[in-house]
Amino acid sequence: MKIKRLFKYTATLVITMIFVLTPPGIAQKNLQKSPGGYHGELDFPISWSRYYSYAEWTKIMHDIQKKYPELADIQSIGKSRMGRDQYLITITAKSTGKHSEKTAMWVDGAIHGNEVNGVTCSLYLMWYLLTRYDYDPYVHDLVDNCTFYILPGLNVDANDSFVVHPNTPNNPREPYRPEDNDGDGLYDEDQTEDVDGDGELSTMYIEHPKGNYKLSTDKRSFVRVDEAEEGVKLFVRIGEEGYDNDGDGLINEDDIGGPDPNRNFPYGWSLEAGNPYPMSESECRNVFEFQLKHPNIFASFHFHNTGRLIMFQAPPAVSQPNMSDEQSQRMRDMQEQRLAMLRETNKYAQLFDRQVAPVDQHDMDTQTAIVTAGARILQNYSPTIGGLSGQAHAATYYMLGAYSYLIELWGSNAEIADMDDDGRVSDEEMLQWIDIELTGEGWISPHKVDHPDLGEIWIGGTPKKHIRRTPPARYIEQEAFKNAQFVMYCASQFPKAEVVDITVRPVADNLYWIEAAVKNDRVYPTASDRAKQLKLVEQDKIMLKTSKNVSMIEVPKGSAATDPSNPNADVEVITKRGTEFWLKGKETIRFGALVKMDGSQGWVEVQVKSQNGGTDSKRINLKVQ
Ligand SMILES: [Ca+2]
Ligand SMILES: [Ca+2]
Ligand SMILES: [Ca+2]
Ligand SMILES: [Ca+2]
Ligand SMILES: [Zn+2]
């Protein structure tokens, strides 16, 4: 049966359509209308100009949950090796539904113990969402409609140690699985120590006639010497501060920490980096088990440092066989030209040199669109495709189908400090940055110290702990703010399936052709290509409900022409059992159905149901006058 045959216009019927609209949401108590006004920041004041110990930041979490019990819950997802709870805060408005029934964002901080600006970024997001809920319609809407699962500290033992104890910027990094690094039968028996007691871990040097370092002219650094100079003291670099605790003649040879936790996840795992087996570390296993139990997690953020990168997961590359060097060069040139063109109107535009299979193309396009926005929001961050190798964000995309992002926070202050613009910040340049921007705070000048094992040594010539990898406290908030913005932007682009543009046309006597569109005006589709392939998501579904006197007339499945004068205006037919489909990002699909009405009035309701895009319905009343 051809649909267009049915369109015999019957002039005697006049249809009135009465839409039933969704009721408006509950008004916000303290809605702030001015961007210059108060947005709740003192309702629960937190200083964002310092780092917090585990005891301090977990207390902040518990206190803020008590302040906003209708928006937040706290649970421990499990314990670390040393028995610390890994506290997760779930944020969503309980009045609008259960957390597990809303599309969710996962956020974790500092899987690498030393990367504690991931903790502050996660805490900041928590605080921003909760304190602004009543004041800021954007936040209100996000917290009403999405769930945020925030685990501020993933590697809690090392996170705490990094903040509380003297450390280099790079340590401690791994979970505390005991490892005998030097094979002497003792575990972690010779770790670093703060030899001079200044609260920092710097570098030790010792005077030696054959040394290859000397003091810089300003005596604030050690610099390499190419050849001996008359009357200049020479030094040998010993390494990080510490003692020979076990008397084996070596210093700091058996430090604390097991495998790299961000190589311990199951996807792309290797024995060498992720030993002894996937998910061996309880800190990681607790996270993955939680994620497996929460299939509503749609996207994930993982805060690391350093380097100002947005590392996102993309679908696998398809190899292009038989491409000559010239052909690949031509492809690269074309790509560069395309990017240059895009950047004429958007300086943040991104394009990536990865060819993916057609079934993965929408994921590639979606991620490109998202990180283009990320490049704008984060400023001076570079989007780049992330690796697999047992990383947490590889597992969330490749195994759970969630769009995932690893953020490398902070980094060298190259754009300010790199005076000669060679792309790196030398000690001298770092010193200038510390003297000017940090008003002198943050450098350890070389000084003599008596070492119990080595005698007279020198310590210093390095920045302090919170300089290179974690921002000095005065920069915590600006970094946390823009990263919270990016996470919220992504959540604001979670799919939303809406029923729009219902129309009804009389066809013949008591037959009516109903049309409606389902629209997703968000960047993300209702399901990632990956989630579809893993069969983790149900298809979106459109159905028709009617009053008793209205019945559906089955029309052959497939698309149907709707307008006799325009054969291109195809729609998908809604069947009696409902029609399944997938809705991409920024896509609208039109549907149609044929109904028969007995009597002079009735109604038809178009309902759409989407696992990640929510439910929506619109009703239309039919009345013959
Ligand atoms: Ca040992
Ligand atoms: Ca060890
Ligand atoms: Ca020290
Ligand atoms: Ca030793
Ligand atoms: Zn890291």
Image (spheres, rainbow, N blue to C red):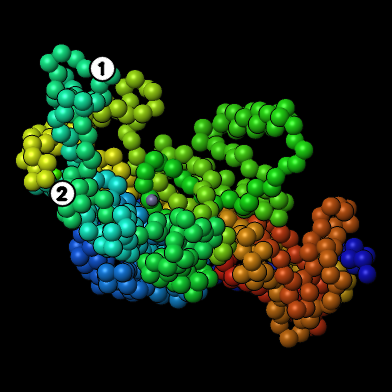
Q: Residues within 10 Å of mark 1 (few under 14, many from 20)?
A: few
Q: CA distance from mark 2 to mark 1?
A: 30 Å
- CB at mark 2 closer than 8 A to ligand 4? yes
Q: Amino acid at mark 2?
A: Tyr
Q: Amino acid at mark 1?
A: Glu
Quick check: 188 above or below 435?
A: below
Q: Which residue is mark 2?
A: 243
Instruction: List x then y, in percent, for residue 492.
Output: 48, 56
What is the x, y in percent for residue 598?
81, 83
In depth, the one of 611 and 403 nearer the eye is 403
Residue shown at 21%/38% (left/top)?
238
Locate residue 517 relative to residue 3 in the image: left or right. left
Q: Judging from the image, what secondary structure is the residue with disc 1 in?
A: loop
Query: Relative to 503, is 377 on the left or the right?
Result: left
Is residue 321 visible in the rendered structure shown here? yes
Judging by the rendered image, the residue that carries numbered circle 1 is: 227
Asked if 489 appears above or below 508 in the picture, the reply is above
Task: Specify the quadrant that holds the N terminus.
Answer: bottom right
Nearest to N terminus: mark 2 or mark 1: 1
The outermost residue toward the top is: 230
Along the viewing direction, whichever of 378 and 461 lies nearer the viewer:
461
143 or 149: nearer the viewer: 149
Where, by quadrant of the figure, is residue 131 drawn? bottom left
